[in-house]
Amino acid sequence: MTETLKCISPIDGRVYAERALMPLEEARAAAARARAAQPAWAARPLAERVDIVRRAVALVGEANDEIVPELAWQMGRPVRYGGEFGGFNERASYMADIAEEALADIRIEDSDTAGRYIRRVPHGVVLVVAPWNYPYMTAINTVAPALIAGNAVMLKHASQTPLVGERIICALRDAGVPDDVAQNIFVSHDTTSALIEAGAFDFVNFTGSVGGGRAIARAAAASFTGLGLELGGKDPGYVMEDADLDAAADGLMDGAMFNSGQCCCGIERIYVAESVYDAFVEKCVAIVSKAKLGNPLEPETTMGPMAQVRFADLVRAQTAEAIAAGAKPLIDPALFPNDCGAYLMPQILIDVDHSMRVMREESFGPVVGIMPVKDDDEAVAMMNDSEYGLTASLWTKDAERAARVGDRIETGTVFMNRCDYLDPALCWTGCKNTGRGAGLSILGYHALTRPKSYHLKKV
Ligand code: NAP
């Protein structure tokens, strides 16, 4: 019997999309076709591959009016935010812009006696496993540079957002990528692992949970398949005593609550200099109290449902446990009478500490804990007291102090006076349980190619 994947809409629990899962043998054959087609794709001029990817990106943009409500149905983000085309286009375009320089040979010697250089060659077949929370942007981070670098790409998108994989691959094919070079596959976890174990792919980029990352890493160990892992986070903010408090409260509350807190680099805990703690907290409560929780298809809604009821229930449990242990919730539930099921009200907790799960484990939801700290040393110790390291957001007018504090934080990215943003020119990376590898930037191309050395002695 064919197994099916069901996308349950967080809006009302209906089955919004259903797709047949590919049996293992079919998936194996698809990967073999990708392998066979890849060398001809890699042999095309780089400029041609760049143009095709740019065209595909534009095609996704042309479909944006259809995509925006479709995204709301699949994962709950309010339509008022207009989808992801801005970031999708920014990232793909930047990677297209730098391709020639990033993929150029590294020339060591070009003399009468020898030519020595390092060339970047594509891995072959790249599997991209993408999450639902920013389904277009997280996928394109790897899909665009992988194809531009000459790889074939197989995209396994999240079951919550199956239409996204179809749309991206369809646009690539319409733009001129051969069918076998870009494929969307609906496969189970077991099939994914079996393919990786058998060496069906030459590189896997996985974006998702720590548990998923572990399963993929175990499978990859069997075939020495190269891996990029972009996993969870518990990103901190630190508001110093000289910060612009209005900007800090605006920025950090947006970072904590946007997309119902379902951002890999969302702000999940905030440390504030004692002297400005009360004023900062008051501003945050005023901002968050204005959120409009509701149907994401309605234009006034600023906060939609979480993608699944179980995600909302996890945040409810973390919050309730913290309150039972002495935390104080500051957002009045009476403002959010529709809190139910996947629809979760935002919450700010004070009187929290690191014994509470809500300050240690990823919440991936609209809750944030705020603690006072006496100085930079205490702030650094608190920020580093985490199994994760994706981003840290520092708020101050003193860039040198931010850089000094940033040097001491175990993190992938240091932000000053901003948060929750991927700059495609900078490397997207993490440490500790947040993962391994490098996405976007020139280093993203290095991850999606392997170095090959040439030493040509002239006689
Ligand atoms: P998830 O359950 O791990 O799913 C993410 C993707 O991985 C989906 O396509 C999922 O497929 C697939 N997957 C999970 N386990 C798998 C396995 N054993 N074999 C094959 N595929 C597997 O993660 P999520 O909870 O949906 O997504 C949120 C998580 O992603 C959070 O932890 C967040 O921090 C992280 N994230 C990190 C970044 C970053 O840049 N560091 C960016 C975005 C999200 P199915 O949907 O079919 O299960």
Image (tube, grey):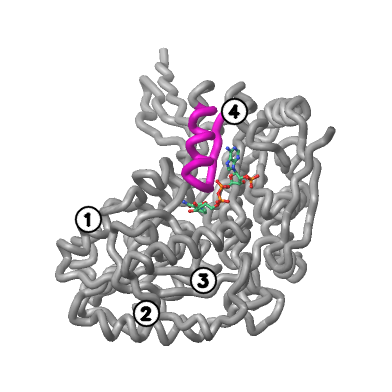
Secondary structure of the residue carrying tag 3 is helix
Q: Amino acid at mark 1?
A: Asp
Residue 407 has which mark? 1
Q: Quadrant of the N terminus?
A: top right
> Which of disc 3 and disc 2 is earlier in sequence?
2
CB under 8 Å between callouts 1 and 4? Answer: no
Residue depicted at x 52% and y 21%: 222
> Which of disc 3 and disc 1 is earlier in sequence?
3
Give the foreground label among 1 and 2: 2
Local crowd size for mark 4, using a 10 Å CA cut-off: few (<14), some (14–19), many (≥20)? many
Residue 2 relative to residue 434: left or right: right
Local crowd size for mark 2, using a 10 Å CA cut-off: few (<14), some (14–19), many (≥20)? many
Residue depicted at x 53% and y 34%: 216
The residue at which mark 3 appears reads as 258
Who is closer to the viewer here, 438 or 9? Answer: 9
Secondary structure of the residue carrying tag 1 is helix
Residue 249 has which mark? 2
Residue depicted at x 58% and y 58%: 133
Disc 4/disc 3 C-alpha distance (Å): 34 Å
Q: Amino acid at mark 4?
A: Ile
CB under 8 Å between callouts 1 and 3? Answer: no
Magenta part of the chain: 202-220
> Which of disc 2 and disc 1 is earlier in sequence?
2
> Which of disc 4 and disc 2 is earlier in sequence?
4
Q: Position of residue 162 (x, y in %)?
A: 72, 51
The residue at which mark 4 appears reads as 196
